[in-house]
Image (cartoon, rainbow, N blue to C red):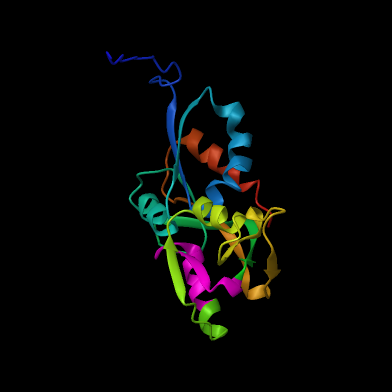
Amino acid sequence: MIGMNYNFPLKNQTPSRKPFKIAASHSSATTVLPLIFKNLIPELEQLNIELMMLDSQEVFDLIRNHEIHFGIIEKPMMDETIETFPLFKDELVLAGKPENDIFFIREAGSGVAHYTHNYLKENNLNPKNLVSVNNNDMIVSQLNAGIGASLISKRFINENIAFQSLDKRYHRIFYGVSFLAEQDKLLKTVIKQIKNLSEF
């Protein structure tokens, strides 16, 4: 069988369009990023947009190095070169079946991992099987199958997943981050548009 190599020109990848790279944490990438992207559609003729999903620390580091233009993170992180501002409200819940003695936890560096460790410690819980997972969709698929429990954003809950609400300490914020010394006028305008979507 002969392999075929197709090269399609990307018409929108033109020098006249400004690169605009957005990186979002795992929970925000599939829940709130679509809300932001929808509002950027009118700007597509001016921008070459690239979307990435990374953990919060990686997003923050890329902003600090000015390798991306806008990021969404799950915990408040500060740096003198970065503007950090609240964007959307979120709520973590205990989802699934804790009685299975299987607890799924996000990897180190994830915003949810910090909350999960605190939850287990505060409630003197020591699950027999603590499973590290680097993707929310994988956790949700296990919960949908009736396997184990996890702390996840309420935005992921569906009719197949039982959940328990937690106290206000597990209410959190998705933060926007941008490079403070950004000079490009168009990109500054776009970031301002995103700020205007804030729930705060």
Residue at the outermost bottom position:
124
Up-down relation of residue 28 to residue 172 (above or below)? above
Up-down relation of residue 49 to residue 29 (above or below)? above
Q: How many numbered circles does the render carry? A: 0
Say whether residue 84 is magenta: no
* Quarter of the figure with the C terminus: bottom right
What percent of the width, then of the height, locates residue 127? 49, 77
**Residue at 41 percent of width and 21 percent of height:** 13
In this rendering, does residue 87 appear at all? no
Residue at the outermost right position:
159
* Quarter of the figure with the N terminus: top left
Say whether residue 104 is magenta: yes
What percent of the width, then of the height, locates residue 8? 38, 14
Up-down relation of residue 166 to residue 193 (above or below)? below
**Residue at 52 percent of width and 50 percent of height:** 137
**Residue at 57 percent of width and 57 percent of height:** 174
What percent of the width, then of the height, locates residue 31? 60, 48
* Of 200 and 188, the residue lying toward us: 200
Lateral position of residue 90 relative to residue 189, left or right? right
Lateral position of residue 115 relative to residue 163, left or right? left
In this rendering, does residue 166 appear at all? yes
Lateral position of residue 48 relative to residue 40, left or right? left
**Residue at 44 percent of width and 57 percent of height:** 56
Occupied quadrant, residue 7: top left
Look at the image and give the residue range highlighted in magenta: 98-118
